[in-house]
Amino acid sequence: MLRLSFTALLPCILTSVFAQGLTESSLEKHVDSLALDFSFGPVKEAYWTGYPHHRRTPFAVSPDGSAAYLAYLDASETDVHVQQVDPKTFAAVGSAVTVAGGKEAAGLVAHSDGFALLTNEALPSGTSNVPADGTPVPVLYRYTDGQQSWKTYLGGPGVHEDFGLVASPDLNGDLVFSEEAGLYGAYFVVTAYTGSAAGHFGDSIQYVAKDGSLQDITGASSSWGCSHNTGIAFEAADAAPFASICAEDQGAIWLNTQTQTMNGVKISNENTTNGGSGEPMGGMSGSYSGLARLTGTDSYVFAWVSRGAKDLTVNDWLGDGFTHSINRTNGRNVAIAQLTNKSTLDGEEATSQVGAADGDSQVNWITEGTADNSNAHVAAFNSESVLVTWEEIAEPQCDFVAMGCRGAFTGAYYQLVTNGKKVGEPVRAMDTFVAGDMVTMSDGRICWPYVAMDWDLSQAVPYGGSKATTTKMSFACMNLGGSASQVQQTSSNPTTSAAPSPEEATGGAPSTTAVPRTADAPETSSAVDPTNVEATTSATPPTSTLLTSVRTESEAPSTATTPVESAGSPEVDEPTTSSAARTVTSVPDSTETAAPVETPTSQTRPHPPCGGRRRRGARRSSAPEPPR
């Protein structure tokens, strides 16, 4: 009898997988597998538009695969909880560790003996030189065997004081760790509260040693990099600087590993209007799993969403190498870029030629068509193949030229990409989303956390924030071998489907029916020739209605969100210097009406001289924000 070993069959199995791509049987779901010790609010409103985004739940697995951890923000929006998770069953291991006072769960690294957490918190009472109104500053915690080992502030007093002190009211960013370098790396959005940049937004890259000591590494650390950073992608390397990418408020996405500023290698031209660029890396709670290092190599893959770029014009303020562009399409499509190493693109750089009709000819598109695609992420299966994911609105209403879109959610998509090329068709799911870090497990699967809910992208989050909460977390995994266990696991005592009352969810406004589990929509968006888009329609978002129907419990957070200030236009920041800058780090408010070739419409709203981010729960308004 002829006997074939599994090793002998493996090349045949992989060849078959690469030929057909992923299938529905590749997607494994563990619904409500993790019981949370505290309530969690899974929905976060987007900056300016208020459209719904998944509130990030950082997820990490130790290098040896023995320990996994999930971090989540308490429903009260104060205190971050970190729960150890069984990496096989995704059930809780012991009780959660609470990091009191944390305002966001912004990044997580798992070790065999504990974890490191990036969060932000108000400085202790009595501290000198603190930001006003208790604005939180970024901080890195290390816990070992359930106990705090050290705590290191990454902003506030004593950190880059020669530049100016910074805080992080919205800690959009990520945390990574390199055992080879012996360093944690954190990349996050900051606002300065002293110095020449006071009142404006940029970003910062900080490194911390294993013992908790903050490192100031020339050519790697940065106190102020990309102006009003609209997206961050960050991944560990064997030595500092780590691989970094930023989307800024002047018209480009930069591979800025070597510069840490809004220059370097231009990955993409993007239309920016009043500081927005279409949320290329996810917007609020979005900057995670956007850059993946291929297993066992020095190569990376970057994923983002874009409306494309055409008709490049000169950026008068920033000069040579900096341009403005017009959107090519109304909705956003998914794109990827290959990196041969942490500083080098595999392929052409985006053009900076003024007058170029095509500003996106170098882009490797994963989707093409009239749909709007958002929430793009990427993770590596191995040294050649990655999983690229996104969410689709097949018939979008794009009210803002440089923000997100709204419409009926028509599916989350999971696409296999090998050596930069799509393999097979994407897997579509209506009940499974990416709402936390995508992690390559020790057995080769890619897994991530999400909350089982009916996801509705058709309306803005109700005024005051979403009231939906849950005490259950689900996990999903994609298996490259196409043989994922279809256990569709659920908790032994699953809770029932529930939703906020109409009064709770809308503040008295009538609610609408939540998006069903299935939708009469095509599996993929139809491919059409891109249309020329210079502006979109009404700038006024719809009346807020019921956002989600969480399939667990739904209750009001213990602390209500109180509006602090009226909404203003997306802000653009003034120039300052950076410790790592080669040319320019940010731009003046005089250039805030970006994309000058556009015909002024209600889209291009006036911008205040010193704009600030809209606080959680602040009411959106069509009127410009007054100077502060």
Image (tube, rainbow, N blue to C red):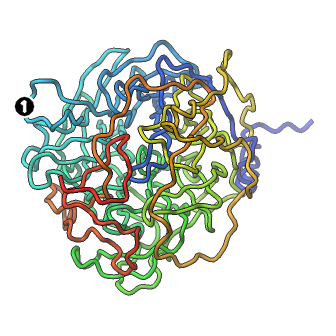
Q: Where is residue 577, by image quadrant?
A: bottom left
Provide residue 434's location: percent of width, then percent of height: 56, 42
**Residue found at x 57% / y 58%:** 373
**Residue found at x 19% / y 68%:** 583
In the image, 45 versus 193, the foreground residue is 45
Provide residue 195's location: percent of width, then percent of height: 8, 51
Residue 575, compared with residue 613, is above or below; it is below
In the image, 198 versus 375, the foreground residue is 198
Q: Is residue 6 left or right of residue 589?
A: right
Q: Residue furthest right?
A: 1
Q: Where is residue 479, by image quadrant?
A: top right
Provide residue 543's location: percent of width, then percent of height: 51, 50
Q: Quadrant of the N terminus?
A: top right
Q: Is residue 226 left or right of residue 42?
A: left
In the image, 295 versus 571, the foreground residue is 571
**Residue found at x 29% / y 60%:** 624
Provide residue 128's location: percent of width, then percent of height: 7, 31
- Is residue 260 visible to us here? no
| Amino acid at circle 1 | Ser
Residue 108, compared with residue 570, is above or below; it is above
**Residue found at x 67% / y 22%:** 496
Residue 188, compared with residue 345, is above or below; it is above
Residue 176, compared with residue 396, is above or below; it is above
Residue that carries the numbered disc 1 in the rendered image? 128
* SS state under label 1: loop
